[in-house]
Image (cartoon, rainbow, N blue to C red):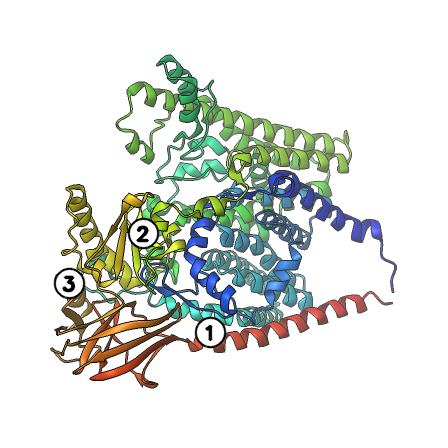
Amino acid sequence: MKNIDFKTQILPHLVAIVVFLLIVFVYFNPLFLENKTVKQNDILQWRGGAHELLEHREKTGEESLWTNSMFGGMPGYLVSTVFPGDLVRYIKKYSSLGLPRPASQSFIAMVCFYVLLLVFGVRPYLAIVGAIAFGLNSFNIINMEAGHNTKGWAIAYMSLVIAGVHLTLKKGKLLTGFTLTAVALALNFRVNHPQITYYLLYILLIYGLVMLIDAIKEKRIVEFSKRGAILILAAGLAIGTNFGRYWTVMEYSAYSQRGKSELKSTGEHASDGLDRNYAFDWSNGMMETMTLLIPNYYGGASNQSLDKKSNLGKALKKQGAAPQQIKQQLKSVPTYWGPMPFTSGAIYAGAFVCFLFVLGLFIVEKKYRYWLLAATILSIMLSWGKNFETFNYFMFDYFPMYNKFRAVSMTIVIALVTMPLLGFMALEKVFKMGFSKTLQKQILIAFGVTGGMALLTIALAGMGGFTGAVDAQLASYPAWFLDALKADRESMMRSDAFRSLVFILLGVLVIYFYLKEKISQPIAIAIIGVLVLVDLWVVDKRYLNDENYAKNPEGDFFAPNAADDFIKQDKALSYRVFNLQNPWNEARTSYHHKSVGGYHAAKMRRYQDLIGAGLTTQTNTLVENLQAGQADFTQAGLLNMLNTKYITFSPEAAGVIKNPNALGNAWFVRNVKLVNSPDEELENVETINTSTTAVVDVSKFKVARQYGTSGAVKLLDYKPNFLKYESNNTEKGMAVFSEIYYPVGWVATIDGKKANILRANYVLRAMEIPAGKHTIEFKFAPKSYEMGNSIMLASSVILYLVLIASLVVFFLRKKE
């Protein structure tokens, strides 16, 4: 074996790991020292929606794949599904060194970006600094605070995928590149955040195009094609390790609100994807891009704390507010004044990182700067959404798959990868080039661009309007309050512009002193590392600090209240609860009960149609009646057919109303209203008496107009994925079940013989049942899960064999 130089080949990487561990240990210290957990709203909501699935898994050891805890019932693929054939989970588990969430995510983000910078030729100690810059950008931290964990993991693995592709295409390390690409893509696919993976594809497509042009110029097109084929194989293997996961999701997506609606009457349902207004709700303002350089350019967050010395604090004191009232008021102030409905914080890349990015546009090799600049510009333009509608509406209407995703402001994640990559490639170039008049001029230009923007902001901050979309909620506030708030927004902009100018200036001075040989390279890298760390750390602490931790947030959030205890006295096998408080965006109810509402961005399309067309209207009517002292459920046919047995409007027992008109788990109807389209089906289900009549689309299902109703259907056994009923009727009947119809995976039998599942009332299951006493069973067993899991297992084994082979070859090459 060749002698390994510990100092150059091992020590830098050990230092990197230790530095990253120290950073996450200190930043997330309550996780380690106080046994606390970050209070993540989305995770709490996910936990509520996933509770039934998790409980079933714990009790039986099997996957339910279907949950009745949200929206009347839906597949569990996008909630919580374990695939035994998924062996990639062990790579994720052990690579994060057992760190608690979300510290593990931050650690992996830095490790992956460190590898990316190494692959692009950045020296290890400088790559450590670049990894810190990426790992601690405020977008990553805000995602953790909100609980967007799958998004954070997908972003972290983006860097590793790019590294693998570059190794394969440009550096010619085929086996290493193939292995790294396959493993990184497998990890990225596994966290199941298609939107981030989609944005990663943009980066790779632009990179591939630039490399293709380069290969044509150098007459290496055959070699380039071979390497491209290797990458396709790597992607195929990665897809194989996640095949079941994506098969089930793709299968469901056709029936989710991401898929094409069957309705033709309403324009908003015409496209095969999300409604445009819904998708573009979160669009960055054009000037909001400035937050990459100046975090508080648009005021920071919709709920941000101010100190008592702020203009608002002084105004409150002047108005005679008590100290405790002032403290409470300043704890959550709408300082953000941008165009979005609300935001958790500013997306900040780092002032010095922005400077380095601009410098990279002058000194980094052309093909890389063209690639990274193009990707950055695309990222920013896409993030503007409806504020740059000419471009973005075209993308939404015509670019493949783009209309499947919402919150287009998220595209800025592309820039958060490309900017530090180009920036630290530029800094590496600076260390290699040494001093020259040309380099000095380029540094001054980059300083002039970024420092100049900060200086102009300081000078012109007073010209801003400092009013935004959120101010509509402040219409009833007195003028003195609004004036003080605007003054604080102006002060925050100016203050952060000055702070960014200082960090840029300090970074430039370090580079200057290094080039003039006043300080050594290690000292220069160390100082830049401290500057980057302090800059991002201080901003990040605005959004994720000690106040975001709790000993047991799940226990506190899901602790049963008096209303829950009252409802749980009902020992019936299955019924539903409707929480009138924000029903379509909360899953706490789903933790304790089977809910009519829920919290999920991919509800079933037909259920969403029902909410928009009738459930919301009937709910409003019901609320009006309740406020008038009349608990009238006769006009709530949709809630009744969903077996909504309890309505809650407060956490007290007195805040629970029992619905005497709930139709139960199943019932016979005499009349069937025959319609010929989904539009007619939805229109009629709002008006019929759901206890005696069902609506059936006869263009899809063949039924009679009338049936006998002298009988009953009783639920005997309930599991999320299995329902057993007993029917007893004197003549052939049409039974309607208060279960959501889903055409894939559900199998029904009558006395052990396969029976047809019909759809009635737009969203429910129905079945023709012969006269007599019968046993009816529904079982959810989709083939996509079983077959997909087998493919995942086989692909995972192949991936591990490739990984082992790659490591063996690596060590063999160390031989003489």
Q: Where is residue 76 in the image (x, y as percent from the top left)?
A: 42, 64
Q: In the rendered structure, are the residues bearing label 3 and label 2 in contact, judged by CB atoms less than 8 Å apart?
A: no
Q: Which amino acid does label 1 sit on?
A: Tyr
Q: In the rendered structure, are the residues bearing label 3 and label 1 in contact, judged by CB atoms less than 8 Å apart?
A: no
- Asked whether, in this view, residue 757 is left or right of residue 74, the answer is left
- Quadrant where the N terminus lies? bottom right
Q: Can residue 280 be seen in this view?
A: no
Residue at 40% x, 35% y is 302
Q: What residue type is labelled 3?
A: Glu
- Residue 584, labelled with which disc? 2
The first of marks 3 and 2 along the sequence is: 2
**In the image, is residue 26 above or below residue 227?**
above
Instruction: Tell me the SS state at disc 3.
Output: helix
Residue at mark 3 to residue at mark 1: CA–CA distance = 35 Å
Q: Which of 513 and 780 is in front in this view?
A: 780
Q: In the rendered structure, are the residues bearing label 2 and label 1 in contact, judged by CB atoms less than 8 Å apart?
A: no
Question: What residue does disc 1 label?
Answer: 785
- Residue 679, labelled with which disc? none
Instruction: Tell me the SS state at disc 2.
Output: helix
Residue at mark 2 to residue at mark 1: CA–CA distance = 28 Å
The first of marks 3 and 1 along the sequence is: 3
Which residue is outermost to the bottom?
753
Residue at 48% x, 69% y is 63
Instruction: Tell me the SS state at disc 1.
Output: helix
Residue at mark 3 to residue at mark 2: CA–CA distance = 21 Å
Q: Quadrant of residue 711?
A: bottom left
The first of marks 2 and 1 along the sequence is: 2
Question: What residue does disc 3 label?
Answer: 683
- Asked whether, in this view, residue 809 is left or right of residue 651, the answer is right
Q: Is residue 447 visible?
A: yes
